[in-house]
Image: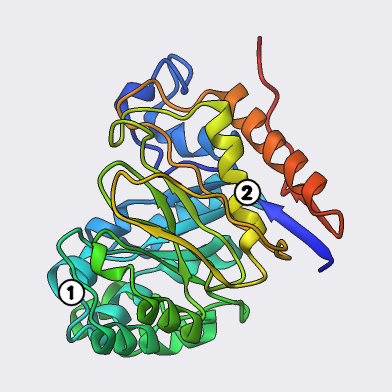
Amino acid sequence: MSGTGTVRIGISGWTYAPWRGNFYPSGLLHADELSYASRQVDTIEINGTFYGLQRPDAFARWYDETPEGFVFAVKGPRFITHIRRLREVETPLANFFASGVLRLEEKLDPVLWQFPASFRFSAERLDHFLALLPHDTEAAAALAEHRSDWLAERAWAKTQHRRELRHAIEIRHQSFLDPAFVALLHRHRVALVFADSVAWPYAEDVTADFVYLRLHGSEELYASGYSDEALDQFCRAYQAVGRGTPTKRCAPGRSRCRPTGPSPARCLCLFRQRREGPGPGRRTIAASEGNAITRLNRENPGTKFESTRKFAPISR
């Protein structure tokens, strides 16, 4: 397989008090934290959308504060995944896409749907939900037109250009370690998140044309980091993309595997940094991306992987 692959390394959010004075320079205004973070990494998850509908002007502001070439991963609302649990979600889904998400334009990619740990696999329910998901921005705008009446004064249901819209699902219940679940993701072209944690099941099934990797903590959830060797091992996950064959599924706490296979034309890798510590080190971020790209190019001579852009200079 030949082509050019893209590696993105980022963080899951940008508003964490322990990062101030560490990752964020002392004296940096809180309002400037997204602008600063988006110039150290090239993708960030928006967490606020998980907890409630945001407003179009917020998405427009986030677009303006981030540089060209930057992309957001937007978390789907917990009202859909945790409260409704994928039942009767047609209108809530329309409300989500009418809330202003489309104002991110080319910086929108992908949408992350995070399932609760108590949510069990139901093939019928999941199939219905996946069929509702729009796969381009025009389809999302059309869906947004079916939003609730109370959103009329603040709705945004338009896009400047038709662009692909990708989706990824993170599981947290062992019942999803089922070939039927993987088959559904394949059919609907939705990615399975490779989510490493000590608390939830882990799977490395490639079901879309990109990999979404979330690192929740090697030893302690949301607290412990990863060694250079561990990060290097995760780079192997890219090799499975393209073949689309299952690699490994395991219960919480089981050892991870190293997938094999050709690499994709496109990749998304999001490293979730510690919430409780000082935040991601800028040298660590640059080194992690450099190691990933070097290894991918060495082990996949037919595919050239590259960063999306240059990192900001690192002061010494």
Horizontal relation, residue 103 to residue 175: left or right = right
- Identity of the residue drawn at 30% across and 41% down: 198
Q: Where is residue 264 in the image (x, y as percent from the top left)?
A: 70, 64
Q: Position of residue 42 (x, y in %)?
A: 60, 45
Q: Which of 259 and 47 is in front in this view?
A: 259
How far apart are the two marked residues, 1 and 2, measured between alpha carbons? 33 Å
Residue hosting label 1? 85
Q: Which amino acid does label 2 sit on?
A: Arg
- Identity of the residue drawn at 44% across and 82% down: 183
Horizontal relation, residue 184 to residue 146: left or right = right
Residue hosting label 2? 236
Q: Judge whether residue 103 can be spotted in this image.
A: yes
All told, the count of numbered labels is 2
Whether 210 is drawn above or below 289: the answer is below
Whether 221 is drawn above or below 144: the answer is above
Q: Which numbered disc covers residue 313?
A: none
Q: Kindly indicate the quadrant of the structure image that contains residue 231.
A: top right
Q: What residue type is labelled 1?
A: Arg
Q: Where is residue 156 in the image (x, y as percent from the top left)?
A: 40, 75
Q: How is the image coloured?
A: rainbow
Q: In which quarter of the image is the N terminus?
A: bottom right
Q: Which of 200 and 266 is in front in this view?
A: 200
Q: Judge whether residue 147 can be spotted in this image.
A: no
Horizontal relation, residue 293 to residue 24: left or right = right
